[in-house]
Image: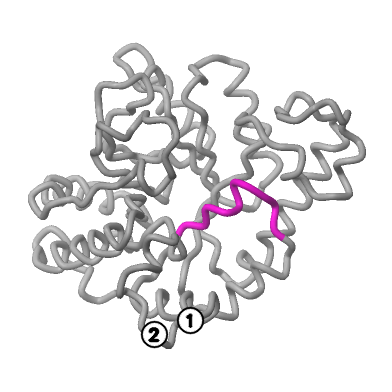
Amino acid sequence: MGKILIGTCSWTDPTLLATDFYPAEANTAEKRLQYYARHFPLVEIDSTYYTIHPEQMAKLWVERTPTGFTFNIKAFSLFTQHPTKLKSLPKELRSSIPPTKNNLYYHDLSIETRGLLWEKFRNALLPLDSAGKLGVVIFQLPPWLIPGNAIKEHLLECKSNVPHYKVAIEFRNNSWLNEKNKQPTLEFLRRNDFIYVCVDEPQGFSSSVPSIDEATSNISVIRFHGRNRETWNKQGITVAERFKYLYSDDELKEWLTKLSRIAAGVKQLHVLFNNCYADFGIKNAQDMDRLIRAQPRLFPDYYLQ
């Protein structure tokens, strides 16, 4: 059975800092990451979606975490076909963009500028990779992207620009995994060694993707977004409020057999809680760890981790 890593998609959300998860002495970014890493083996970095950090940032992440700790990274928004503010680009690249462009898309940039952005992104993650602490790079597609050759070619281009990193794809439009497209989508991912990101989230919206427990590479990723239907598509709220949901034990138990089956066929299974309102994600990550440990028949090797 593959190694199971459990963690959350944030360790610095303001609503979490307002709880008692961190002791009073964990009063800096450095101390909070060190404290988090003593409790969990995995975390997802969300800030990389909004900006390309300098290489020094990843060096600090490496220094502040123990051997074996794993970081999953969200890909920069421009690479995932999301609109991106001009100010989000590195300063030295902004001068090549027409000043009238406020929201940029990938196709707005010259091939040369794209290449420089990819180089900066790769370099920003290099310290994690060199230290053996880089898990996967998650490309979360926008909800308006539907299946087609153009987007598939774009995903292949993305993969070719991070050839040494493991690429994971999260769909946010249910047409990718409907009855017609499910098998072609999964086959495309398998054929090109993309990691399929399985999700648990509210159903009934065009942006709702079904929870299909499939693996398409030797690493599998599952992200728990909560099941809050009232806030799923609500405008004008924070990201934390959108995912404000605390799973019950019974809801988490629904996943145990699925997790066992997936883990049996992969090298690693990453279980991430994105319900990062207050300490909801922390609690549910701890709950999942407890529930897995209580099922040695389903997870015979987990206690050895």
**Left or right of 249 in this view: 7:** right
Q: Secondary structure at mark 1?
A: loop
Rendered location of residue 17, percent (x, y): 40, 68
- Measure how far apart labels 1 and 2 are at the Cα level: 6 Å
Viewer can see residue 66: no
The residue labelled by disc 2 is 24
Would you place residue 174 above or below residue 58 in this image?
A: above
Q: Secondary structure at mark 2?
A: loop
Query: Residue 210 appears in which quarter of the rendering?
Result: top left
How many numbered marks have been drawn onto this rendered protein structure?
2
- The quadrant of the image that shows the N terminus is bottom left
At label 2, which amino acid type do we have? Ala
**Left or right of 277 in this view: 128:** right
**Left or right of 301 in this view: 30:** right
The residue labelled by disc 1 is 27
Q: Where does the magenta region start and end? A: 44-53
Rendered location of residue 92, percent (x, y): 89, 49
Rendered location of residue 38, percent (x, y): 38, 80
Would you place residue 177 above or below residue 42 in this image?
A: above
- The quadrant of the image that shows the C terminus is bottom left
Would you place residue 26 above or below residue 117 in this image?
A: below
